[in-house]
Image (cartoon, rainbow, N blue to C red):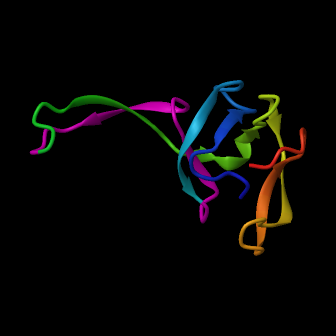
Amino acid sequence: MNVKKNDIVVVITGNAKGKEGKVLKVFPEKNRIIVEGVNVVKRHTRPSQSNPQGGVVQKEAPFNASNVMVKDPKSGEATRVGYERTKDSVSGKKKVMRVARKSGELF
């Protein structure tokens, strides 16, 4: 799965095509994600101690991670994600960094 929490992503298919948002939660075992402001559904909640009023609540529902692409930090367009091995200049340890395929920008 190329998408991680707090990534800014662009929806490439479905009803929300073209929308952008921040990834709130990732479910790698199910290949699903929750994106802020995308796939918002209404849930009717029954009154409880935590919510004594009850009523209709809007919240984001998970959808398949294949429907989004990571937003390129340089150009702002949707891009594929690659991985590159780099050496840390301070500690000298090897690290695996993600790289945007469109611009070559590390993130």
- Please tell me which residue is depicted at 51% across the width and 35% down the height of the picture: 36
Quarter of the image where one finds residue 67: top right
Does 101 sit above or below residue 11?
A: below
- Please tell me which residue is depicted at 80% across the width and 33% down the height of the picture: 74
- x, y (%) of residue 40? 48, 30
Give the magenta range. 28-49
Question: Is residue 33 found left or right of 88 in the rendered image?
Answer: left
In front of the other: 12 or 56: 12
Does 88 sit above or below residue 7?
A: below
In front of the other: 102 or 64: 102
Quarter of the image where one finds residue 49: top left
Question: Is residue 36 magenta-colored?
Answer: yes
Quarter of the image where one finds residue 53: top left
Question: Is residue 80 found left or right of 20 in the rendered image?
Answer: right
Q: In which quarter of the image is the N terminus?
A: bottom right
Does 14 sit above or below residue 64?
A: above
